[in-house]
Image: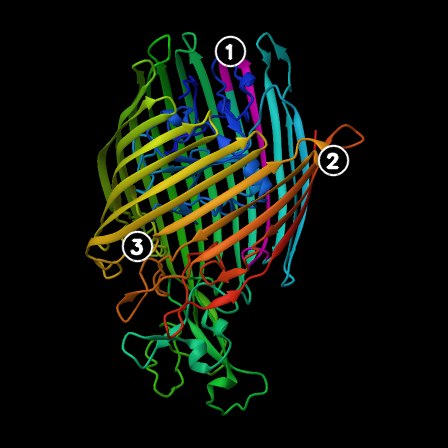
Amino acid sequence: MKNVLLTGTAASLCLSCFSAAAFAQDGDDDARSESGLTDVIVVEGYRAETTQSAARINVPIDEVPINVQVFTKDAIEDLQLLTQRDALQFSAAVEDKRVRGFNTGEFFRNGFVHLSDSPGFTIERIEIVRGPTATLNGPVTPGGGINTITKKARIGDSFGQLGAYYGFSEDSRDNRGFNVDLNVGDIGLEAEHGAVGAFRFVGGYQQDTGFQTRTDNELNAILPSFQFRPFENTVVDLEYYRYQINTDRTDRPFGIELTIPGPTPGEEIPLALAYDIDPRASYFGASTDIEESLEDWSASITQSFADDRIIASLSYNDHNRDFVFGPGNRPRIDIFYRVLPRAGADPDTTDPADFELRRLTENLSLKNDIDQLSGLVTFVADDAGDHRFISGFDFFDQDQRLIIMRPRESGQTSGFFFEFFEIEDVNTRSLNFNAGAADVFFTTVLARDREIKQKSGFLNYQGAFFDDRLHVLAGVTYSDIEIDQSDPRVSPVMTEVIADSEEWLIQGGAVFDIIEGIGLYGNYSQSQLPDLNDPDFSQAPPVRKGDQIEFGVKYSLFDDLIVGTFGYYFIDEEVRGPDNDRDVEAQGFDFDAFIQPVDNWMTVFSFSHVDTEVTASGSSTFVVGQPLVDEIPNKLAIWSKYDFEAGALDGLSLGGGFTWTGRAVRPTAAAAQSVKTLNGEVLRYNPVTRLDLFAEYVCETPWGNEMELSLNVRNLTKEDNISTVVPLVPLQGGVQPNGDPYEFDGSVEFMLGLALRY
């Protein structure tokens, strides 16, 4: 195993900020500064040798007793991954936001909680840290956390890229966009220690007509950042991020089913089947836009002392997000429907075929304002760097405001329910419709404010023993969570404490190199965080606490031709709250391998298996003996690239990615966290495969710059069932009377790209 001492500040999946002083250098080992303030993030194509998220400081992956997978910038660009979720489909341990069978809730961005997706053109790399790593990542769920690291200003290096792409598919959907990435590495005056400032601007625009997500999206984002080094031992980083997306889901098949009880006890029949109409009518129908905007400010200062034996950092992040669901986009709160006469229909008819369904769910707006402050001190205890102590604090304060407006008719004071038509042999108790066309207006029915405060302090130790053969990690975290809630309609000044929890969380683990290239590891870890999966603030949030035991092997074989990790784990989660108690056990394994038989051929392979089971429950949502809906029982992912380096094909690269997802658990239409059953059997999605291929050609322009032409062909398997129709919303879905999911034909997608670099 390698012994690479890299001191400095880096991201943690807790609320510590990733200091841009530890900016990724993409494999340039010579970029390490003599002061130690700038970490080297070693990357070789698709292989990352170091991690920022598994430890409070940047360390080699093979030296931490934690299971980590990294998506590099090369993989993101080669596969034309437009968002972080798009990238995560190629990780076996992840499906959407679910890691090891547990929903992670939110992503992290540069170590801070982030409430939105990040466009692919802003991403430097994505790190998946598996398990409830408490002392490193306090608020992470028992399954783990996902940290997106963005592109930041880089002192001493100037470069630029201008890219554009156009995509189209067999079903006439298209996709287009452009992006720019410009870094000026030597702004300001020169000092004895070199350049004192750098500026980087990253920005782009994307527009599609349902190209991948089957929703119409239009987004733009800008990411300017500065890095200053006024003194040799001081680095200051500033960043601003602005993100705007508008989504139109009109007439798209939605992953949430509308059913009515069937004639057989326990059977549910899709609405479309009862009416003998288009099967897609059983899913959410015509709907309006979702608008989302986000502003994010970050600042950090990093200072080294005592010949780099002590490095301290203070970081602040202000995160503001506005999110508006239009009518027809509320998946989990009350849903209202009305049936309107079809054009030309007899006004006195009672035939259901003469009517059409219109969905009039609530209009919701949700505003989040998050302030995060973190401090970090790294102390190197010896000259060899074999013993390091990392201590610090994290303060997290999130203000949420929720406003729900409900459709009503003039004069109504109750819900918007209407009379339903009788259908022979069908119990119609679950739905109500109206054949009239009265005017509808919206009125506020719920307005709540919630403040989530989490304070934590930690002390970690990392050490090496026995000639660097044993690497030890141990630490303790104090975590204090408090959640206050108020209703401004009732009393804007009165608040109620609805959750309060203090915990001491521990973690310990070690990697021992039994022979060169083979290291056995084990760890025990804990975590706690509030469960905020209640969109209408109707319940007091329970607190989730996770414990994990994991054993495995980290290997580097045949002179680094095959490098990877195998880990087997046991997870226990306890959720305690006034309205939602449960215990869950999970066990499984992850296998990852980076294979490079020759310098110009790289392959990444991963396979994951997990079994989850509810072992105790005080809630009707979770049934003892059933799995979690977030379980990913089996998933395999492979992506590969071959570069031609000689002859007529010099500059050409060919590659692709393949995923297979096993029979994932199906949620109910009523609650995203409830398992869907039929006659006592747990229903699951059919297995899904996906195959993407790409070709790239890089050449030099007459002006001496580099130009890249690319072609990506996506979804060659043409599989597109309800589990993959809308990956950006909670995955739910309908069921045919025999228990099988509805399946819609997918389409092959093509994407042409052009990039100019200097």
Sequence-earlier tag: 3 or 2: 3
The front one of 169 and 45 is 45
What's the CA distance linking mark 3 and mark 1?
Answer: 50 Å
Q: Which residue matches tag 1?
A: 34
Q: Where is residue 548 in the image (x, y as percent from the top left)?
A: 26, 38
Using the image as rendered, state which of residue 497 and residue 122 is in the foreground. Answer: 122
| Image side of residue 346 versus residue 105, left or right | right
The residues tagged by marks 2 and 1 sit, at their Cα atoms, a distance apart of 43 Å
Q: Could you classify mark 1 by the number of other residues whose Cα lies within 10 Å: few (under 14), some (14-19), or many (20 or more)?
A: few
Assess disc 3: are there few (<14), some (14-19) or many (≥20) residues with their C-alpha within 10 Å of its C-alpha.
many
The vertical placement of 489 against 711, above or below, is: below
Sooner in the amino-acid sequence: mark 3 or mark 1? 1
Q: Which quarter of the picture shows residue 758?
A: top right
Q: Is residue 668 magenta?
A: no
Query: Which three-letter amino acid code belongs to the residue tagged 2?
Result: Ala
Image mark for residue 628:
3
- Say which of 699 and 499 sits in front: 699
Total numbered labels placed on residues in the image: 3
Task: Please give the residue where the numbered disc 2 appears in the rendered image.
Answer: 648
Give the mark nearer the N terminus: 2 vs 1.
Answer: 1
Q: Can residue 109 be seen in this view?
A: no
Q: Which residues are the magenta region?
A: 211-235
- Residue at image point 35% right, 65% down: 670
Percent x, y of residue 107: 43, 42
- Locate residue 379: give its quadrant: top left
Residue at the image position 37 percent from the left and 45 percent from the top: 608
The type of residue carrying mark 3 is Leu
